[in-house]
Amino acid sequence: MKRIFVLAFGFVFLAGNAFALVKDDRIMIKGIRPMGMGGAFTAVSDDENAVFYNPAGITQRTSWLLQILSINAATANETINVIKKASDIKGGSDGIKAKDIQKIKDDFSDKDISLSLSLPNLFFISSPLSLENNSISFGFGEFISADIGVNIGISVPDYVFQLALIAEKNPSLITESDIISVLPPDILKDLGSNLSIPQLASLLNRIENGDVSAITDLYNSFGDDEVKNLIADLKNGNKSLEDVISELESRFDASIINKILGSVGATGVVNTYVTGTFDVPLAYRFKSLSALQLPGELSVGVNLKYIYRVKASQIVSLSADDVGALENNLDSLNLAVLSGNGFGIDLGGIYHWTPEWNFGLQISDVFTRINYNNVIAKYPKSASDSSFTENAYIAPQFNIGVAYNPEKFYYWKDKYFQADKRFTFAIDLRDLFGTYEPDFADRFHIGIEYRLSPIALRAGLNKFHPTVGAGIELGGFQLIYAFYGDDSPLAKQLGSDKTIYYHEVQISIKFGHFDGRPFGKDAAPKSQPEGSAGADSKDLVLE
């Protein structure tokens, strides 16, 4: 038995890496209810979110669930701030100031501009079907989500600010030494020279004073052939010093401009996905574990999924002099929009130790493959399609969790803490082996939910970032909101860590969503003595 267990888990690990070329991002629609609870849902998993958190959880329902419409919209808090600041920008007739450059850099650099929108999503979960002493549940549904993310890092060296400050002066007050003092030492590097501007001025001064050896020194200090020919003309007497200095200044001015344009630029992360999944969860519940000499019940489940995805994910770096070329020719980019499809499997289990306690395990993306075999658009267009197409895999992820649904708080006798007004406490350790979350602290998720029909309140910690949520349900209509913090995936691609806070809203039409997991004595196994079953399940409320 032990050998089979080790081989099974080893095979799951190998499945994520064998025959794969590219590690793709997870197919994970987070779900607004779980995110209000800090993402802790592996052992809760009693609604349509079971598809993404634990398919075994669908056996917990006391009746069917039918979702005929669900639309989610989410955006990063920074996106709202960027839009607001962009609308405040006003043009001026006196040119751009140093403070304007600094404000643009502060307001727009390294900000997450992201938007997530789910198209109308459909889902159905059957009520448990009895099979002798056990039960089986199944479901099917489709989810379509569009995620657009852009992060732009604007690079403006300090000397550019200094030059802007000098330019703001009265022209009659600007001296040559003012400009020379702020220019970088390698400003003449484009001309193949390591000379600083003061060193160049010293050589020209020596030549003006009749030092012939200084001409040779000047000739040897440049690698640019045209500059060397110009100095040779001076040495041979073909051009005067005044003519040479005039042409050198012209070339130096161009070198300075190139240096500035080369150092002022932006690095952008484009991370855009349109993901559609068709899911078929199937779960089986063992209502007696006497053969294993264990109390409680056990649910096991599998989710089979077909995936269609369109993606454009790329890091693009542009200097200021690239922008003009970009405006006229997108072929200066190395970017492609790909589409592909594939299949995946998720496994899950929940051990119902007591009516109040659940222990959950999910292994997501056991055999998930996506073949990006279609190039929708590419830049440069001259590149072959094969240079962009790829076979991708999504690595398996192990998640464990525990959920506690107290029958009541024994020291609080108020009716609002009993009967069908219940709490759910949950803790998850997601991505157990650090496949996507190398930082151990980022694997923790803690959440709490309280229902007082028709309102639900939620709070938690997602990777130790605070989350809150609330919802209201009237008949078959649901409106839910969540505010949560998460690590910025865009910043990670640029090699930095940053926390982003998101607002997410969901509007949905569901029938049967009241009949989710029963709580307290209502969840007692049918094998328990009569009288221990508590309130009638029709009074239960679950959002």
Image: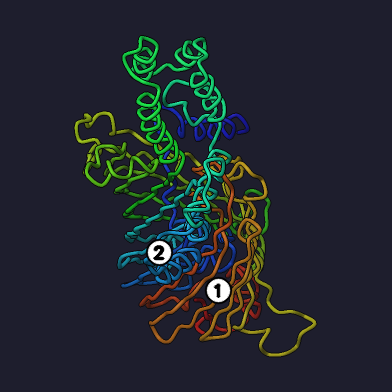
Badge 1 element: strand
Which one is closest to the eye, mark 1 or mark 2?
2
Q: Residue furthest bottom?
A: 415
Q: Tell me, yes or no, if residue 132 can be seen here.
A: no
Q: Is residue 541 above or below residue 44?
A: below
Percent across and percent down for residue 35 are 53, 64
Q: Is residue 73 above or below residue 178?
A: below
The residue under the point 37% across, 61% down is 139
Asked if residue 202 lies left or right of residue 26, the reply is right
Q: Which mark is residue 303?
A: none
Type of colouring: rainbow
The answer to which image quadrant residue 449 occupies is: bottom right
Q: Tell me, yes or no, if residue 321 can be seen here.
A: yes
Q: Earlier in the sequence, mark 1 or mark 2?
A: 2
Percent across and percent down for residue 7 are 55, 30
3D distance between C-alphas at marks 1 and 2: 48 Å
Q: Report the quarter where the N terminus lies.
A: top right
**Residue in front for this viewpoint, 367 or 388:** 388
**Residue in front for this viewpoint, 258 or 460:** 258
Badge 2 element: loop
The residue under the point 40% across, 86% down is 475
**Residue in front for this viewpoint, 291 or 405:** 405
The answer to which image quadrant residue 528 occupies is: bottom right
Identity of the amino acid at label 1?
Gly
Label 2 environment density (alpha carbons within 10 Å; few <14, some 14–19, many ≥20): few
The answer to which image quadrant residue 261 occupies is: top left
Q: Which residue is mark 2?
A: 94
Q: Which residue is mark 1?
A: 469
Count all numbered tags in the image, as a single digit.
2
